[in-house]
Image (tube, helix red, strand yellow):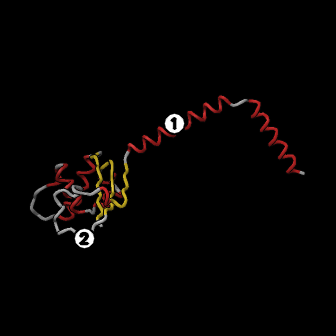
């Protein structure tokens, strides 16, 4: 099997990203005098070299990053791929019929859920508007009777 993962990020706080990379660079300090941490691209290189991708994913804000969409695919394979065979294009050539499971995370789904919740709220409001107010009064009387019976 293969596990394919893609995570997108935006640099939300460039100064935080640069500061984290400078701390790593100072701690590792190879003495060459180059400051790769002075640029966003250099800082990203330093951080992704120093930290595992899963560690960055677990605390992106500490690195000045904002999470974007992500996906994880588990695909069935008949045999193990040759070393380096898929490195150029890891998602290319995936047979959709061989995908065992897939997990997608996106703000699009949050928007859809919020839209559905709004729709439900609107329907509930319409139903409440259409209900006979006398029914509410009848329900209140039934509750009062139940309370009296319980006291006996």
Q: Is mark 1 on a helix, strand or loop?
A: helix
110 above or below 31? Answer: above
Which label was assigned to residue 109? none
The residue located at (25%, 57%) in the rendering is 94
45 above or below 110? Answer: below
Question: Hey, which residue is sitting farthest left in the picture?
Answer: 32
The residue located at (16%, 53%) in the rendering is 42
* Residue at image mark 1: 118
| Picture coordinates of residue 39, whole percent (x, y) | 17, 49
Give the alpha-carbon distance from disc 2 to disc 1, as whole Å: 48 Å
* Residue at image mark 2: 79
Q: Earlier in the sequence, mark 2 or mark 1?
A: 2
Q: Indicate which label's residue lies in the foreground, 2 or 1.
A: 2
The residue located at (26%, 55%) in the rendering is 20
Question: Hey, which residue is sitting farthest front in the picture?
Answer: 97
139 above or below 8? Answer: above
3 above or below 136? Answer: below
């Amino acid at each position: 099997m293969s596990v394919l993962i893609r995570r997108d990020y935006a640099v939300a706080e460039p100064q935080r990203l640069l500061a984290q990379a400078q701390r790593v660079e100072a701690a590792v300090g190879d003495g060459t005098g180059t400051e790769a941490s002075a640029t966003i691209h250099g800082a990203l290189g330093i951080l992704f070299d120093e930290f595992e991708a899963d560690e960055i994913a677990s605390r992106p804000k500490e690195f000045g990053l904002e999470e974007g969409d992500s996906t994880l695919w588990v695909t069935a394979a008949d045999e193990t791929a040759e070393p380096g065979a898929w490195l150029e294009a890891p998602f290319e050539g995936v047979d959709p019929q061989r995908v065992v499971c897939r997990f997608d995370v996106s703000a699009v789904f949050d928007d859809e859920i919020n839209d559905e919740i709004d729709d439900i709220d609107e329907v509930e409001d319409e139903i409440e508007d259409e209900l006979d107010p006398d029914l509410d009064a009848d329900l209140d009387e039934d509750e009062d009777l139940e309370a009296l019976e319980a006291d006996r």
